[in-house]
Amino acid sequence: MTEDHTPAPTPDPLAVSARTVVVDIEGTTSAAGFILGDLYDYARPRLASWIDDHADDPAIAEARQQVVHDASLATDASTEEVVAVLHEWMERDVKATPLKTIQGQIWAEGFAKSEISSHFFDDVIPKLRDWHAHGVGLAVFSSGSIASQVPWFRHSPDGDLTGLITDFFDTVSAGPKKEPASYDAIASSLGVPAGELVFFTDNPGEVAAALEAGWQVVAFSRAGEPFFEADFGEAAVVSSFAEVEVVAP
């Protein structure tokens, strides 16, 4: 019996009609291991000096006060005590806004000095460029601060991508990623109806929140990432940007 070597047909891409694609970063456009490894390792030894050297920066002062409050520290807690909490949060990958604020500033300087660079899966950048060229809007919603998102896209392996992105959102500007109200806020800011927005994420909790807000959602299940083969409910599930075709309505 002759063995059939005919290649399996390539499945049709997931067709999405949307005015704007909003992307998550960690686990969706970029490897979580890179962020939790290289970037965390860069920020960790710099936290204490950054907090002390930028004590007059309102954003850093507010972040410090929030750490003290959230961790129930004494109001006169030392920088060492604050940093110990930040280290604990980093070990547990807690998406705490004050941590993201401080990390974001440290990373922004690291990007500017070319001491660190960003990571994108190979399938991401070509699709972002293609969708942008065909009139699809692109935005970012990440737990990482806007201060870290912008240099992340500016210092990509394929050059400056910030010209492709119309808006950046974080948990300060939009709200927590697992709350539908945050997606309402983004839709309002973009001036786009919820039904004409699509969110790309790998997090089941974020999938549920965006769906509840009336958005379209594409869930990413990438091998080796934290939510590989998770239960994404009613959302369409893919493993690559190459499996999605977005067309502006």
Image (cartoon, rainbow, N blue to C red):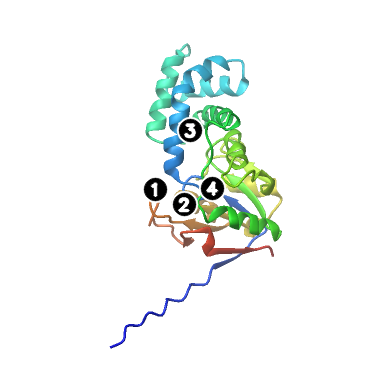
Type of amino acid at the residue the image marks with label 2: Asp
The residue labelled by disc 3 is 96
Residue 122, placed above or below residue 169:
below
Type of amino acid at the residue the image marks with label 4: Asp
| Mark 3 vs 1: CB contact within 8 A | no
- State which mark lies toward you, 3 or 1: 1
| Mark 4 vs 2: CB contact within 8 A | yes
Q: Considering only order in the chain, which callout, 4 or 3, is on the residue closer to the N terminus?
A: 4
The residue labelled by disc 2 is 202
| Mark 1 vs 2: CB contact within 8 A | yes
Measure how far apart labels 3 and 1 are at the Cα level.
Answer: 18 Å
| Mark 3 vs 2: CB contact within 8 A | no
Residue 119 place in picture, x, y as percent: 51, 44
The secondary element bearing badge 4 is classed as loop
The residue labelled by disc 1 is 226
Q: Is residue 229 left or right of residue 188?
A: left
Q: Nearer the viewer, residue 86 or 125?
A: 125
Residue for point 58% across, 31% down = 108
Residue for point 47% across, 18% down = 48
| Mark 1 vs 4: CB contact within 8 A | no
Type of amino acid at the residue the image marks with label 3: Ala
- Label 1 crowd (10 A; few <14 / some 14-19 / many >=20): some
- Label 4 crowd (10 A; few <14 / some 14-19 / many >=20): many
The secondary element bearing badge 2 is classed as loop
The numbered disc on residue 171 is none
Residue 79 place in picture, x, y as percent: 46, 15
The secondary element bearing badge 3 is classed as loop
